[in-house]
Amino acid sequence: MVDKWSQDVTEHSDALDVEEGLFTKDDPAAIARGLKQSAEASHRRKGTPLQSTMGMLTFYINRAGHNLPKAQLQVLEAAKGELHKLFDKD
């Protein structure tokens, strides 16, 4: 669960617009693909698409991580590697 501050930042900053439930998926590659699609479609991002996706993922892990099961944290950490693979192919 993301706290109110995190939700406000996500809705009113240059944070990416991501599909609802993206960070709860159990497939790191699916999370990475969803983040990549959001970054490439966004007009609100700062930096490169890779920087934006890594920033959003790290933000979520840091803010919601203490409430997540260890298995989901591992999935999210693995998504970082999947993001690097996706962007290295471009």
Image (cartoon, grey):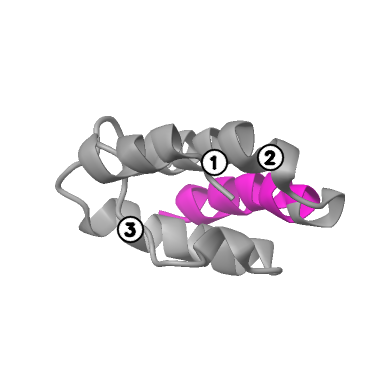
Whether the magenta-drawn stretch holds residue 78 is answered as yes
Whether the magenta-drawn stretch holds residue 75 is answered as yes
* Disc 2: which residue: 65
Identify the element where label 3 is drawn.
helix
Mark 2–mark 1 contact, CB under 8 Å?
A: yes
Q: Looking at this view, name the residue that lies furthest to the front.
A: 4
Identify the element where label 1 is drawn.
helix
Task: Give the x, y percent position of residue 66.
Answer: 73, 37
Q: Residues within 10 Å of mark 1 (few under 14, many from 20)?
A: some
The boundaries of the magenta stretch are 73-90
Question: Measuring 64% from the left and 52% from the top, which residue is drawn there?
Answer: 79
Q: Amino acid at mark 2?
A: Gly
| Magenta-colored segment: predominant secondary structure | helix
Q: Which sits in the foreground, 75 or 3?
A: 3
* Marks 3 and 1, how far apart at CA: 15 Å
> Which mark sits nearer the N-terminus, 2 or 1?
1
Dot in front, 2 or 3 = 2
Q: Residues within 10 Å of mark 3 (few under 14, many from 20)?
A: some
Task: Give the x, y percent position of residue 34.
Answer: 45, 64
Dot in front, 3 or 1 = 1
Task: Give the x, y percent position of residue 41.
Answer: 22, 59
* Disc 3: which residue: 38
Q: Quadrant of residue 67?
A: top right
> Which mark sits nearer the N-terminus, 2 or 3?
3
Task: Give the x, y percent position of residue 88.
Answer: 50, 48
* Disc 1: which residue: 60
Instruction: Give above or below for 49 relative to 85.
Output: above
Mark 3–mark 1 contact, CB under 8 Å?
A: no
Mark 2–mark 3 contact, CB under 8 Å?
A: no
* Marks 2 and 3, how far apart at CA: 21 Å
Question: Measuring 51% from the left and 67% from the top, which residue is drawn there?
Answer: 21
Q: Amino acid at mark 1?
A: Tyr
